[in-house]
Amino acid sequence: MEARPYQICTRCIMDTSDPDIAFDEVGLCNHCREYETTMQTQTPPMEQRREALDQIVSEIKVAGQGQEYDCIIGVSGGVDSTYVAYLVKQLGLRPLAVHMDNGWNSELAVSNIEKVLKKLEIDLYTYVLDWEEFKDLQLSFLKASVSDAEIPTDHAIHAVLYQQAARRNIRYILFGTNLATEAILPVSWTFGIQDWRYISGVHQQFGSKPLKTFPHVGYWTLNYHYRQIKRIKHVSVLDYIDYSKADAMRVLTDVLGWRPYGGKHYESIYTRFFQGYILPTKFGIDKRRAHLSTLIVSGQMTRDEALAEIRQPPYAGYMQEDDMDYVLKKFGFSEDEFQRIMALPVRTYHDYPNSLSLVKLTRTLNLGRWARLVGFRPQSA
């Protein structure tokens, strides 16, 4: 197949490293157009956000009367989840913080979580994954040779949050996912955080250990048991404020003593290595392009600033070397074994069982917001 000519959006910095990207007659990409539509249809107008937030807070407080906690928040130590912890306390809520430890936390992440929650006086519940099971699942995704090899972690996080909410009879889970900094992410790069059929299908083909304890949630359990029977609601609370990443970081550092990591989701050593080395080296994907493009379209960064940042290496060379040594040792890989995995032909979720047909059905039924909330990213038009 003839290589597609290189093209970059005239507004953001998304380019043909997304194979599904489309441009209009003035060079504007589909991600920019979809961002505007998404903001109009999935978030309240700016002038109505405070009222909408107050209404949600009131509902949470009423639903949580008589309970030790009235909501659950997920914490990773990153900017968004940490700011949610700060925000909910400002709103007078009584959260339980839930953290899922997958074995890859940096020391700084652990320090940030402990420091912030202590200052905010928020209780913490930590779920620790069985390392041998999770390692086997992560290795399965590396052997599957797909670019979305990090979704097992995100899937487990969602599963643990819903499990804890159901177990404790808590009706609201407040997430740090938000459109202001995360709206753009091509489905060709990351597919189906909540697609257990895809995750389990990859593991069945490449794994060697049964996933006896790995927390997971399928479509029916999520949408009917948790959402309909248990009536658990998912709230992307940052979509109800004028959320600025730079302002959030200033608050966290000045008020809570939080320390930055130098990259989005770099609180995880594996995420840092996967996004900073494996994705650009093997797949030609620099996820910073999507994150920076979202900041452009949300007015938090200029295109020139984003272009200057994307020209810089994903992370420092010495850190990359240290991370590679750490990752290979933790996985039990020799360098030759790792390079053989890096040399495998690139594949996509299309090559494995998945729930894409279900995603398309949600679009047909005009359930796009539900699809976004449960972690699916429908393909661009």
Image (tube, rainbow, N blue to C red):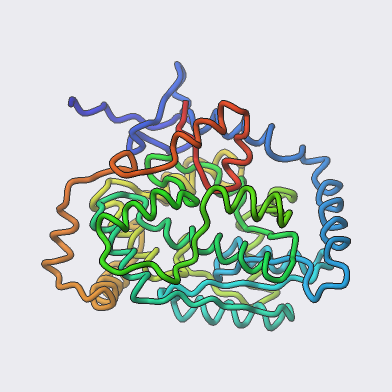
User: Measured from the top left, where is residue 101 in percent x and y?
Assistant: 48, 75
Q: Residue at x 50, y 51 (%)?
A: 194
Q: Nearer the viewer, residue 253 or 114?
A: 114
Q: Residue at x 47, y 42 (%)?
A: 304
Q: Residue at x 74, y 81 (%)?
A: 121
What is the quadrant of the N terminus in the image? top left
Q: Nearer the viewer, residue 184 or 321?
A: 184
* Snapshot quadrant of residue 39: top right
The residue most toward the left is 336
Residue 8 vs 243, above or below: the answer is: above
**For this view, does 113 lie left or right of residue 209?**
right
Residue 216 vs 28, above or below: the answer is: below
User: Measured from the top left, where is residue 152 in percent x and y?
Assistant: 42, 60
User: Measured from the top left, where is residue 134 in percent x and y?
Assistant: 37, 69
Residue 224 vs 61, above or below: the answer is: above
Q: How many numbered discs? A: 0
Q: Residue at x 27, y 62 (%)?
A: 207
Residue 283 can be seen, yes or no: yes
Residue 306 can be seen, yes or no: no
**For this view, does 373 lie left or right of residue 339?**
right
**For this view, does 127 lie left or right of residue 94?**
left
* Snapshot quadrant of residue 299: top right
User: Measured from the top left, where is residue 106 in percent x and y?
Assistant: 44, 77
Q: Nearer the viewer, residue 135 or 89?
A: 135
